[in-house]
Amino acid sequence: MALVFELYPDEPYNDFYVEDVRVELIEIRHEFCFKLKVFKPAIHTVHEITDQRAEEILPGVRVSAGDKADIEKHGVKVVIEAPRRIRVDRGTVYRQRQNERSKT
């Protein structure tokens, strides 16, 4: 089952995390074509995402463009396919969880 996030070019709604790896929306060409930057520990990679095929951005994690994004707000839909054992969070949720952990 796929997870779908709507991302916008402005923070804090421009990213998501796969485990502890940040994935950021860096460019929107149109609602079905955009670029994501993956901040891997040793290297950063950029992937062009379309609705034509799913792109593997990390081992076992494939991403494609969804349909009917709120393009009036300059948003895109990101369809994320990953095994259930891999945690995927919106950037806002991930940062909130990290802040709660640091308080304990």
Image (tube, rainbow, N blue to C red):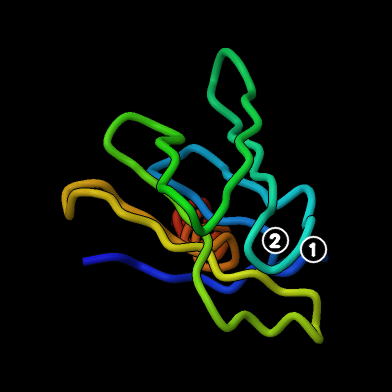
Instruction: Give the side of residue 94 with respect to residue 6, left or right.
Output: left
- How far apart are the two marked residues, 2 and 1, measured between alpha carbons? 5 Å
Instruction: Give the side of residue 32 with respect to residue 4, left or right.
Output: right
Numbered label attached to residue 9: 1
The answer to which of 6 and 30 lies nearer the viewer is 30
Name the residue: 70% across, 61% down.
Answer: 14
Residue 31 picture quarter: bottom right
Residue 8, x across and y down, in percent = 73, 69
> Which quarter shows the N terminus?
bottom left
Q: Residues within 10 Å of mark 2 (few under 14, many from 20)?
A: many
Name the residue: 52% across, 76% down.
Answer: 67
Residue 73, x across and y down, in percent = 80, 83
Residue 78, x across and y down, in percent = 52, 63
Residue 35 picture quarter: top right
Q: How crowded is mark 1: few (under 14 residues within 10 Å), some or many (20 or more)?
A: some
Q: Which amino acid does the dot numbered 2 rest on? A: Asn
Which residue is under mark 2? 14
